[in-house]
Image: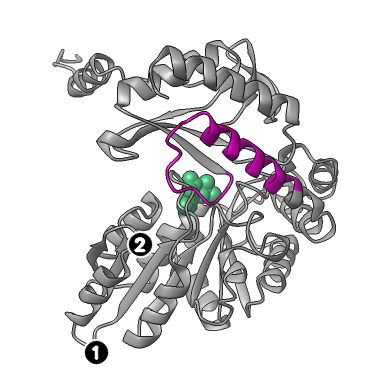
């Protein structure tokens, strides 16, 4: 007979109630159709300023065709983890193409950017090592550092002197990983890549950059911040994502042949999780073709970025220190940011609200991301809505 018992997960309901009371409870928005610049979420047509689909590649004809061909020729799944039977020749082709693109000896592809960061940091470091990390680095870096059991030292966002102080206080023989995002995902500013590379050289650190939001956006043909800053050869571990500007799914690590062989043997998401289906891999290869052959998409992304950012600034919004197509509109209070997002949505503009713990308590915001495929009319429409709703809520 089954014994009746109190629900052991009842505390989760209490947590959710408290989110509701704080105005921070969110229903998932449901996309009805393709991920695109103007589309329908929750039965409402909106200008979509919330995707990471920077270049519009989610629906690019070349990616679609290559994915469909791969399904016809190679099937729907890979059937195994990479290290057992799940390495198809198409997986190796993608890694070779990415290595050539990033100008490194080798590349390993993971199931996601999250897995690439967490799996790599956890594999490379041990409990005897130290990770020195920018305060605003992505959650996947933080989780990887925790999994590694290394000591975690955090420096305030982009404060090089503080990073230097941490390094000065550490024993010179200790293994150290210095790590930054290339583009910070919530603020859109660039990491202090050149300064940190110099510090890494001075103190003998492993240098790692997470270029998730820079892939396809910064550098020649979207090669990322290492290319943008001219830092080739000075970053030991480069992470990129295939899920954002590349329009598909996955993450990768670019570096020396020894690093990649090591990750093939020790990175747990590589060893213990099934590899990408052929359609995903084929579409990623097509995305590299597009970056190489259609750089005008990146030009269009930057034209739209300049137009929209200037428009928001002219309206008097606090847009922080963004240097990329990610532009926050900072409201301060979490509930106010969520209200701003809801009112924008009701008026036909989707800009997701973001609050604590994703950003600091007093820095809640809506985050906007323009893409290469937005039209000027759509961006102007969005600016007009921002002007109206911002005035109504007293945000500008
Ligand atoms: C800075 C940063 N790194 C890594 C990731 C993870 O990438 P992916 O979505 O491919 O898992 C993200 C995505 O949110 C990100 O913003």
In the image, is 97 to the left or to the right of 354? right
| Of the pair 288 and 133, the residue shown nearer to us | 133
The numbered disc on residue 58 is none
In the image, is 89 to the left or to the right of 353? right
Q: Is residue 224 magenta?
A: no
> Which secondary structure, mark 2?
loop
Q: Quadrant of residue 338?
A: top left
Image position of 251 with respect to 308: above or below: below
Task: Select label 2 or label 1 by which is in front.
Answer: 2
Check mark 2 vs ligand 1: CB closer than 8 Å? yes or no: no
Q: Quadrant of the C terminus?
A: top left
The stretch of residues the image draws in magenta is 300-325
Query: Would residue 268 be seen by someone viewing this image from the given angle?
Result: no
x and y percentages locating residue 196 in the rendered image: 40, 73
Report, in whole angstroms, how far the alpha carbon at label 2 lies from the one at label 1. Answer: 25 Å
Give the labeled residue for mark 1.
173
Check mark 1 vs ligand 1: CB closer than 8 Å? yes or no: no
Residue drawn at 71 percent across, 63 percent down: 94
The numbered disc on residue 158 is 2
> Which secondary structure, mark 1?
loop
Labels 2 and 1: the sequence-earlier one: 2
x and y percentages locating residue 172 in the rendered image: 23, 88
């Amino acid at each position: 007979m089954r014994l009746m018992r109190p629900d052991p997960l009842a505390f989760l309901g209490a947590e959710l109630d408290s989110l509701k009371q704080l105005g921070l409870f969110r229903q998932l928005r449901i996309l009805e159709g393709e991920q695109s610049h103007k589309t329908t979420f929750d039965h409402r047509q909106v200008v979509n300023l919330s995707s990471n689909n920077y270049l519009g590649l989610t629906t690019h004809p070349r990616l679609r065709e290559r994915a469909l061909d791969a399904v016809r020729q190679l099937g729907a799944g890979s059937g195994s983890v990479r290290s057992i039977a799940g390495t198809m020749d198409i997986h190796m082709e993608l890694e070779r193409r990415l290595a050539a693109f990033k100008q490194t000896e080798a590349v390993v592809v993971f199931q996601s950017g999250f897995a690439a960061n967490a799996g790599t940091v956890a594999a490379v470091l041990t409990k005897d090592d130290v990770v020195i990390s920018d305060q605003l680095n992505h959650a996947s870096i933080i989780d990887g550092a925790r999994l590694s059991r290394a000591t975690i030292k955090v420096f305030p966002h982009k404060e090089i002197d503080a990073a230097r102080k941490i390094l000065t206080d550490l024993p010179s023989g200790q293994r150290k990983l210095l790590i930054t995002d290339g583009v910070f995902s919530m603020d859109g500013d660039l990491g202090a890549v050149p300064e940190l590379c110099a510090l890494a050289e001075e103190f003998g650190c492993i240098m790692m950059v997470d270029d998730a939001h820079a892939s396809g956006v910064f550098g020649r043909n979207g090669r990322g911040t290492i290319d943008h800053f001219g830092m080739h050869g000075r970053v030991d571990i480069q992470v990129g994502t295939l899920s954002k500007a590349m329009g598909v799914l996955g993450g990768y690590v670019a570096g020396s042949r020894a690093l990649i062989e090591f990750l093939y043997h020790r990175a747990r998401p590589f060893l213990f999780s099934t590899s990408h289906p052929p359609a995903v891999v084929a579409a990623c290869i097509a995305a590299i073709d597009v970056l190489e052959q259609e750089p005008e998409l990146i030009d269009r992304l930057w034209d739209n970025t300049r137009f929209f950012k200037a428009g928001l600034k002219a309206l008097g919004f606090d847009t922080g220190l963004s240097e990329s197509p990610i532009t926050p509109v900072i409201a301060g209070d979490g509930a106010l940011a969520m209200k701003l997002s809801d009112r924008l949505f009701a008026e036909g503009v989707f800009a997701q609200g973001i609050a604590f713990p994703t950003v600091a308590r007093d820095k809640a915001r809506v985050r906007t991301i323009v893409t290469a495929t937005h039209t000027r009319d759509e961006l102007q429409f969005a600016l007009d809505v921002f002007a109206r709703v911002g005035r109504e809520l007293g945000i500008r």
